[in-house]
Structure formats: C-alpha cells, structure tokens
Image (tube, grey):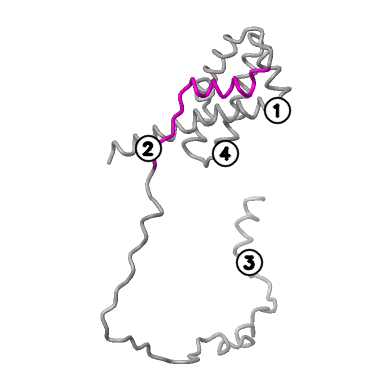
Amino acid sequence: MSIFLTLLVPKLPSPISEDLSKGILESVDFDSYKNIILEERTIKLENEDAEVAPVPVSGGGGVGEAELEFLSAILNSFNTRFGDIPWSDSDKVRRVIEELPAEVAKNEAYQNAMKNADELTARIESDEALMKVIMAYMTSNMELFKNFQDNPSFKKWLQDYVFDATYTSQQHNRVTEITQHI
C-alpha cells in the first residue's frame, strides 16, 4: 500500500492556488536603477616632458640579519636581574635554563605556530609550551618551578628569553632555507 501511494502522489494534479508572484516585476521601477550619465568631460594633459619620482627604497625590504646574542651575555643579564634569588644549586638552575629553549622548540603546537601563524600566536604557544616544560622539571627542580610561579618578573624574563631564543632562530632558519632555494 505504501509503495502504491508513493507512486500515486506525483501523478495527482496539484491544487490550484493563487500565484503570489504575479505583479511583482511590474511594481518595480527599473528605470530608477539604470546608470545615468551625469557629466561628460575630457582630460587634457600638457604635452610636456615630465618625470615620475622613483619609489623610495629607504624603507628597506627583505629580511635583515638575525641579532644573535651570546649565551654568556644572556646568563649575565639573568644574574644581574635575579642574582639575589638564593638558589640552592645555581649550576643546576643555569643548566636547566640553558636547556629550556631546546625543550620548548620541540613542542609540536609551537612548531606549527612558528611555521603557519603570526608572532603573537607563536608567543602564546611558546608560553604554553614553556609552562609544560617547567611542569615536567617540577620534580627534579622544584626551586625553579616555585620561582617561575611566584615571581612575575622572573616568569616574564624566562618567557621572553625562551621565545626570543626559539622564534628568532626558527625565523633565521626559514630565511636561510628560502634564500638557498632562490
């Protein structure tokens, strides 16, 4: 029965109803939408020799050299800023801080952000990756973790240090790859 009714419905005539679209085209004034020439003029140029000023090149294009800083200079700035923190094992903390950029650079989300996103997104991913690495070091270096959590200036310095070390080197590597292909 279902099959019979399914086949019957398309064969039946549709009910007659009023066509609501009649008269719509007649009610629109298409003349008001036509392009109208308001004014016609000619442009006359002087028949003289003229020079067009060159495009200024002082703005600088291309990519500049990466500004790399020696690790000893970075550690000296760290010591002058945070030398008053009584580290129980300062050599261990220094070694961990030296390893942090390499550990953060291994983070897949951060690598994707460096390759495919802008600097701000890469910065956010770098900070998140740094937090994960610091959490991993929490058991072996509680002192570093505690200072990272409790000291906002130390946290900001460490985030800046790691981001500058990883993002600048990644951008420099990308520029090197591009220039090698040219």
Q: Is residue 93 left or right of residue 43?
A: right
Could you say which disc has been placed on residue 152 in the image? Answer: 1
Secondary structure beneath label 2: helix
Q: CA distance from mark 1 to mark 4?
A: 21 Å
Could you say which disc has been placed on residue 121 in the image? Answer: 4
Near-viewer residue (24 or 109): 109
Amino acid type at mark 1: Pro
Near-viewer residue (36 or 137): 137
Q: Earlier in the sequence, mark 2 or mark 1?
A: 1
Tell me residue 30's x, y (percent). 57, 87
Classify mark 2: residues with Cα within 10 Å, few (<14), some (14-19) or many (20+): some
Above or below for 101 versus 138: below
Could you say which disc has been placed on residue 175 in the image? Answer: 2
Classify mark 1: residues with Cα within 10 Å, few (<14), some (14-19) or many (20+): few
Q: Quadrant of residue 142?
A: top right
Could you say which disc has been placed on residue 69 in the image? Answer: none
Q: Earlier in the sequence, mark 2 or mark 4?
A: 4
Q: Name the residue carrying label 3.
A: 12
Q: Which residues are magenta?
A: 64-84
The reply to whether the C-beta atoms of the residues labelled 1 and 4 are less than 8 Å apart is no
> What residue is at 60 percent from the left and 28 percent from the top?
159
